[in-house]
Structures are given as C-alpha cells and as structure tokens.
Amino acid sequence: MKAKVYVTLKPSVLDPQGKAIKHSVELLGYEGIADIRQGKYFEVALDGSLSEAKAREQAEALARDVLSNPIIEDFRVEIEK
Amino acid sequence: MKFGVIVFPGSNCDHDAYHVISKHVGQPVDFIWHRDTELRGYDAVIIPGGFSYGDYLRAGALARFSPVMNSVKEFAAKGNLVLGICNGFQILCEAGLLPGALIRNRELHFVCAHVNVRVESVNTPFTHELKPGSILRLPIAHAEGNYVCDDQTLAELHREDRIIFRYCDRDGQITDEANSNGSRDNIAGICNRERNVLGLMPHPERACEDLLGSSDGREVFRSLAGTLAAAA
C-alpha cells in the first residue's frame, strides 16, 4: 500500500518559483497558461498490515506534522492499494 | 554567564557565533551537539546560521525534530534567552517558537550582501542597548528569508511591538527596494510574546569586526550580555 501526499502552497502565499516557471513557459510560446504553482509530492510506502482507514489516518498525521508547514501549505492524501 | 551554540549537521555559522561570544563578549561558551538535551547551566542559547539537514524538505523543517529542540523549548519557556540567526530563525519558526514562516526569496536568488536594518524596538533583552530607529549594517546570506505570516499575526506583531528589525535604505526609510528578499512589511527579525526568543535573518555575529565590513552587530551581543549581567 502506498500513500501519495501532495503539498501545495496556500493560495494566499506567493509562489516566486511557480511564477518564474510560468515566465519561462511563456517564452517558449505556450499559450493559454493562466498560472503555474509549484508544490511537493511524496510517496510513502506503507506496511501492508495497516487497514486502509488506519493508513490514511497515519499518512494524514505525517503530512500535517512533518511534510507540510500549515502556516504556508495545504496537503492532500491519496491511498493507493 | 554561560552561552551555548547549538550545532546541527549542516550548521556553518556556529564558529562565528562562538568566536563573538568568546572574543567580544568575553564569556564562556560551548558548542552543543543537536543530539544533546542538557541545557542546564546555560544562560543563553544561540541557534546559528547554516543549512541544517541540507535545508531538505523546508529550511529548518528537519532540525526542529532534533532531540535538542525539546530542551530549547523548555529552556525558552523558563524565560531563558534564545537567539536564532538566519537558519536559526527558520528553525524557530518551524518549531513554533516564533510565528510565521520563511519562504523562497521574492527574486529567487540566494542573496549575499550587506544590508541596512532599522531597529524597530529596543524593548528586548537583545536590543536594549541600541538606539530606537538606529540603522545597523549587517550581512545577509540566504535564499529563504522571505518572511510571511497571515494578517492576524502581522497585526499582533505590530500591536505587541514584536517586530524588532526591518530592512531599510541607508536613510532608514522602509522601502520596497530595500526589501532584499520580499519579506512582509520588510520584516527582518521578530521576537516572541514573552520577548526572550528573537529570530532574525541578518547575521550580527558576522558583523563584529571592522575588518569584516561592519561592527554594528556587536551591539546586539552587548545588549544580550548586559541583560544577563543585570540578572546575575
């Protein structure tokens, strides 16, 4: 079982890296790109002995306490069997 | 009075801080390895600059889980003095000892330069010997020094006189141009509500000798030592 954790900057926090990427992408001629925001992605391999509910609980605690900083970031967890 | 300088894997301004305390403040100082947890006997602890844990995950994010940090929290809760410089400021924010966070500089670059910072409050154990509104010339060297916080926190920092240093121009004006990393309200340093924990991005410990371009940082350490001497 695997937990996929997506960490993104809160909408209210400026993302200078995303802005720089968008600028480069525009220079390359891509059209219709309104915005690019950069985030982080983690794959957490879980011991198969955990129930899906327990695995989610654990992954969410990990995302909240370690992988993200709640002052500037949001997170989303997906469990893959 | 006795000082401790905490050393994480990747700290690189620990020797600068040690040098300033032993040579300019003239007081005993120890390095404290991040796995040590005993802070008894120390009067002030410095969390130095550098790249603890290689800045992996986020700057300061992994250092906050080092065993010594629980001791630092207890040390601070007892009213002892904690000074976080650069990476030390990032660690204090990640550990929740100071509000807000430090994100990537507005212009993305690592900025290594001498900047001007204005002393906004002398009502701390770290700044009481400075003149209110005086301008210090201090070096900065960071890529993640862009201070952010929500509106409520910002209002609280203002109301409680907890913004201690702000980036300014040479005349002391708070301008956007002088804001070398994009920090909210030009914030360069803040303290906690109890005023015994201070974090700042500029490096006062690297500005204690004229040979190094500025000795303005000495006043911070003089204030700190003055506070401890008065308490002794």
Image (cartoon, coloured by chain):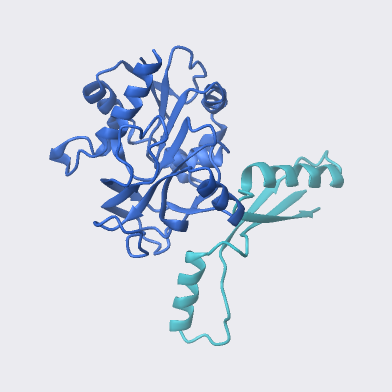
Position of A63 compared to B140: left or right?
right
Q: Is residue B48 above or below residue B133?
A: above
Q: Position of residue B47 (x, y in %)?
A: 42, 32
Q: Position of residue B26 (x, y in %)?
A: 24, 19
Taking the spot 36% from the left edge, 14% from the top edge, the residue there is: B1
- Which image quadrant for residue A49? top right
Q: Colour of chain B?
A: blue
Chain with colour cyan in the figure = A
Q: Position of residue B2 (x, y in %)?
A: 36, 16
Position of A43 compared to B153: left or right?
right
- The number of callouts visible is 0
Residue B9 appears anywhere in the view: no
Task: Locate the C terminus of chain B by quadrant.
Answer: top left
Residue B159 appears anywhere in the view: yes
- Which image quadrant for residue B106? bottom left
Residue in front for this viewpoint, B69 or B123: B123
Q: Position of residue B138 (x, y in %)?
A: 27, 45
Taking the spot 32% from the left edge, 47% from the top edge, the residue there is: B133
Residue in front for this viewpoint, B72 or A17: B72
Position of A11 compared to B61: left or right?
right
Residue in front for this viewpoint, B131 or B59: B131
Taking the spot 73% from the left edge, 42% from the top edge, the residue there is: A61
Taking the spot 53% from the left edge, 40% from the top edge, the residue there is: B98
